[in-house]
Amino acid sequence: MKNLLWWAAALGALAAAARGQAPAAKPASPAEPPDAKAPAKKVLNLPHIRVDLAKRQIEIAAEIAQRDGPLELLLCHQGERDYESLLRTKAKPSGLHAALLALGLRPGKAA
């Protein structure tokens, strides 16, 4: 589970870098009580994908596909090219696309 959270944080940092922004820093003093008037967090739960709109983070339920061998992909759908991927997931690519669109990202164009 720690590896999954680490990868989710790493993917969030990559997404922030792609937007040209620095990743959000944690508050300096976590001991402060949360503001009672703070809006509720907006979270979308898709199959095997969790989208936190307030934090602009996507968490994908995944497992390690291989530890050794040639690496072509970071993440793949279970049963498709997991022999050359680091992680595999049951999440559908269309679900990940929907999560990225929910964060306000736009589809790119092939070079």
Image (cartoon, rainbow, N blue to C red):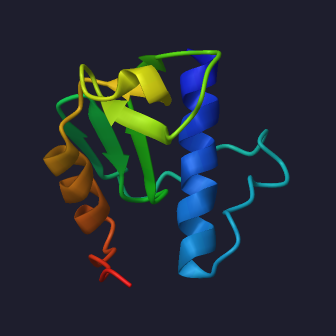
Residue name at image x 27 percent, y 22 percent: 78
- Residue 77, image x, y percentages: 27, 31
Q: Among all residues in the image, which is located at the extreme right?
A: 28
Task: Find the residue positioned furthest to the front.
Answer: 70
In the image, is residue 70 above or below residue 18?
above
Can you say which quadrant of the picture contains the C terminus? bottom left
Res 99 quadrant in image: bottom left
Q: Quadrant of the N terminus?
A: top right
Up/down of 107 relative to 66, above or below: below
Q: Is residue 85 left or right of residue 29?
A: left
Write down the quadrant of residue 18 in the picture: bottom right
Q: Position of residue 103 (x, y in %)?
A: 33, 66
Q: Quadrant of residue 35?
A: bottom right
Q: How many marks?
A: 0
Residue 61 or 92: which is nearer the viewer? 92
- Whether residue 11 is visible here, answered yes or no, is yes
Q: Is residue 8 left or right of residue 32?
A: left
Q: Position of residue 46 (x, y in %)?
A: 18, 38
- The structure residue drawn at horizontal position 18% and vertical position 57%, both measured from the top left corner, is 98
Compared with 94, 64 (above or below) is above
Is residue 34 at least partly visible in the picture? no
Q: Residue shown at 54%/78% (left/top)?
A: 19
> Which residue is pictured at 42% across the width and 20% down the height?
83
